[in-house]
Each structure stands twice: as structure tokens, then as C-alpha cells.
Amino acid sequence: MYLQDIARVIRSKNAGPRCTTLDIMFNSDADYDRVVQSKAIDAALIAELYSTPIADVKIIEYPVSRALKIAIPRKVTAGDPGDRDVYGAQQHARLFKVQV
């Protein structure tokens, strides 16, 4: 099963000009628990998917909201030359096919 099959929301956005956040929200405690307990989404996976050092990946669990927030540094500051996603709103697609 893929993450896109059980997550209610998978999105990305800027968290300032130098950081992108990836938000994953689930409909049920069971789906949230499945992903968190399986460690299907961990810093190593995110580092690999986004070509960033593992030490720079921050994963915050919000069990009350059944959500995960992942913060990663942007390679290019938002709005600088070479930035292809000023709002960071198109970075989440890499998570869709993560096996859970």
C-alpha cells in the first residue's frame, strides 16, 4: 500500500524562505499509527527522497491531529534565481508512492 492510499492530506509549503515543510494527515488513528509504528517515514527516507543530509531532516509527530510534519532545508532560497517552486507547494509528490 502507498502513502497516498491512506493519507487524507499530503502537502508541502514554505516555512520561511529557507525551509520547506511536508505535512501528512490521516483520517484515522489506525492509519496514523500504522505509519508511525512501522517507521515507514523516517529521516533516512526523507533524506534520500529530497537529497538532503539526514541531520537536517526534522520529523514532528502530532498524534492528536493524526499528522506528521517534516521540515527540510530548501536547496535554493525562495525567490532566488534558480528557484522553481517559490511557494514550496510542489514538493510533496515524492511522498505519494512511499510504501507503508
Image (cartoon, rainbow, N blue to C red):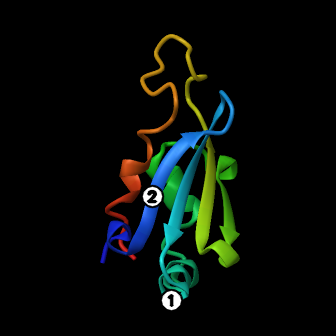
Q: Is residue 24 above or below residue 14?
A: below
What element does badge 1 sit on?
Answer: helix
What element does badge 2 sit on?
Answer: strand
Q: Residue at x 52, y 62 (%)?
A: 24
Quarter of the image with the N terminus is bottom left
The location of residue 66, given as percent across then percent down, is: 59, 75
Please rate how many residues cluster around mark 2, counting C-alpha atoms within 10 Å: few if below 14, some from 14 to 19, many from 20: some
Residue that sits furthest to the bottom in the current view: 30
Q: Is residue 97 above or below residue 72?
A: below
Q: Is residue 62 above or below residue 73?
A: below
Q: Is residue 81 above or below residue 21?
A: above
Q: Residue at x 32, y 72 (%)?
A: 5
Q: Can you identify the residue that label 1 sits on?
A: 30
Kind of residue sitting beneath label 2 = Ile
Instruction: Check residue 93 in the rendering and tell me which mark sits there, or answer none.
Output: none
Q: CA distance from mark 2 to mark 1?
A: 17 Å
Q: Quadrant location of residue 52? A: top right
| 66 left or right of 6 in image | right
Which of 40 and 64 lies nearest the eye of the viewer? 64
Quarter of the image with the C terminus is bottom left
Compare marks 2 and 1 and give the one earlier in the sequence: 2
Q: Can you identify the residue that label 2 sits on?
A: 10
The location of residue 58, given as percent across then percent down, is: 68, 55
Kind of residue sitting beneath label 1 = Ala
The location of residue 94, given as percent across then percent down, is: 38, 51
